[in-house]
Image (cartoon, helix red, strand yellow):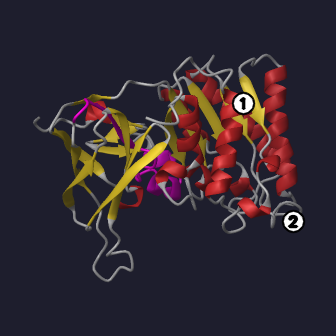
């Protein structure tokens, strides 16, 4: 089988800048803070998904990647690709760092639907793929789930891209998660709400707020008004889809410590939840609120802020439980092939 163009096989994509998947509208970057525009260049959550006929021995993937300078501590970091079938990791294949390369991932003989999670930190761009000893076709298209948030949504401290809470919940729900998490960002930037409104999607989740405690400190009243404005802008493009607000998870240092404007994270969390509940009471019948504080304990944090793999799994399970009755009908990804 010859080389196939990657576009029909890509999932988790928001925008393309040329052939490069990006996570903010490339025509509207000037309105964004520089840190968000920088994080948006990383293809977090972008995957290659395909159906292999029985007997297909492997899939080969050609890609382009970023390679650090030789004196960079990460220069020798290998490019690792994880192959999943359903909710099961089939295997990982790693390649030496190179600006362009080809990786071969062995497949089980039974065939079926597979997902390749890419080495996100190296900004990989899939260039082509082909089957070895069989045939490939694009995987079935699933409903798109737009997930906006901060570094926790981006997947920090999960040991693999597939272990982030959006990726895990996407498998539980049978959705195609589009990861719009920005480490250090997600502070209620209204241009991002307009980006979300322009993206096609059948489900939307907003999971931000912790960076409003310290990185750009705000008051509870400010966050309450900002959440209402953010949702109003998103609803211009998605007036009737399920929209879930997840308030900040546990951050021990911030829970009862006042920021520069006098607000604790507990107060900010309550303001965010109140904004969501008020909007629902005022007529937004498809708006849901998931309080983040009960989801994690200190043992689920890797560094006092970001969840470990267990923490990501707990957030994913809670989000999936709330969304399941409201999402478009889709067959969840089976636990086993």
> How far is the residue under mark 1 from the one under mark 2?
30 Å
**52 part of magenta stretch:** yes
Classify 14 as above or below 161. Answer: above
Of 14 and 104, nearer the camera is 104
Residue depicted at x 49% and y 49%? 162
Extent of the magenta region: 29-55
Residue depicted at x 49% and y 56%? 160
Q: Which mark is residue 206?
A: none
Residue 73 place in picture, x, y as percent: 39, 80
Quadrant in which the N terminus is drawn: top left
In this view, the residue farthest toward the left is: 2
Of 47 and 189, nearer the camera is 47
Q: Mark 1 or 2 closer to N-term?
A: 2
Residue depicted at x 44% and y 41%? 28
Quadrant in which the C terminus is drawn: top left
Q: Which mark is residue 257?
A: 2
Q: Which mark is residue 322?
A: 1
Classify 13 as above or below 152. Answer: above
212 with respect to 204 (left or right):
right
**Mark 1 Cα shell of 10 Å, populated few (<14), some (14-19), many (≥20):** some
Secondary element type, mark 1: helix
**283 part of magenta stretch:** no
Q: Specify the quadrant of the image occupied by residue 297.
A: bottom right
Residue 331 place in picture, x, y as percent: 52, 22
**Mark 2 Cα shell of 10 Å, populated few (<14), some (14-19), many (≥20):** some
Viewer-nearest of discs 1 and 2: 1
């Amino acid at each position: 089988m010859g080389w196939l163009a990657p576009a029909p096989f890509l999932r988790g994509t928001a925008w393309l800048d040329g052939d490069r998947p990006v996570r903010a509208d490339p025509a509207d970057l000037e309105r964004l803070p520089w840190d968000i525009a920088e994080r948006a260049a990383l293809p977090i959550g972008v995957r290659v998904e395909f159906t292999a006929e029985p007997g297909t021995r492997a899939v080969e993937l050609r890609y382009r990647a970023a390679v650090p300078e030789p004196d960079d501590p990460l220069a020798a970091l290998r490019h690792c690709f994880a192959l999943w079938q359903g909710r099961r990791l089939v295997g990982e294949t790693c390649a030496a760092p190179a600006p362009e390369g080809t990786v071969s991932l062995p497949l089980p003989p039974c065939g079926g639907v597979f997902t390749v999670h890419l080495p996100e930190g190296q900004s990989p761009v899939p260039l082509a793929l082909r089957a070895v000893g069989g045939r490939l076709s694009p995987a079935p298209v699933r409903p798109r789930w737009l997930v906006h948030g901060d570094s926790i949504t981006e997947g920090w401290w999960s040991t693999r891209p597939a272990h982030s809470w959006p990726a895990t919940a996407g498998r539980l729900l049978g959705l195609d998660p589009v990861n719009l998490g920005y480490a250090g960002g997600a502070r209620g930037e209204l241009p991002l709400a307009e980006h979300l409104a322009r993206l096609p999607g059948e489900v939307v989740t907003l999971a931000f707020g912790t960076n409003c405690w310290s990185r750009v400190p705000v008051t509870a009243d400010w966050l309450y008004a900002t959440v209402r404005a953010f949702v109003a802008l998103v609803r211009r493009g998605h007036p009737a889809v399920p929209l879930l607000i997840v308030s900040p998870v546990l951050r021990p240092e911030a829970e009862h410590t006042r920021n520069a404007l006098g607000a604790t994270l507990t107060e900010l969390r309550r303001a965010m939840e109140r904004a969501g509940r008020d909007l629902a009471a005022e007529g937004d019948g498809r708006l849901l609120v998931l309080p983040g504080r009960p989801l994690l304990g200190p043992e689920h944090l890797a560094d006092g802020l970001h969840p470990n793999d267990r923490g990501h799994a707990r957030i994913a399970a809670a989000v999936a439980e709330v969304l399941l009755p409201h999402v478009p009908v889709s067959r969840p990804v089976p636990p086993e092939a």
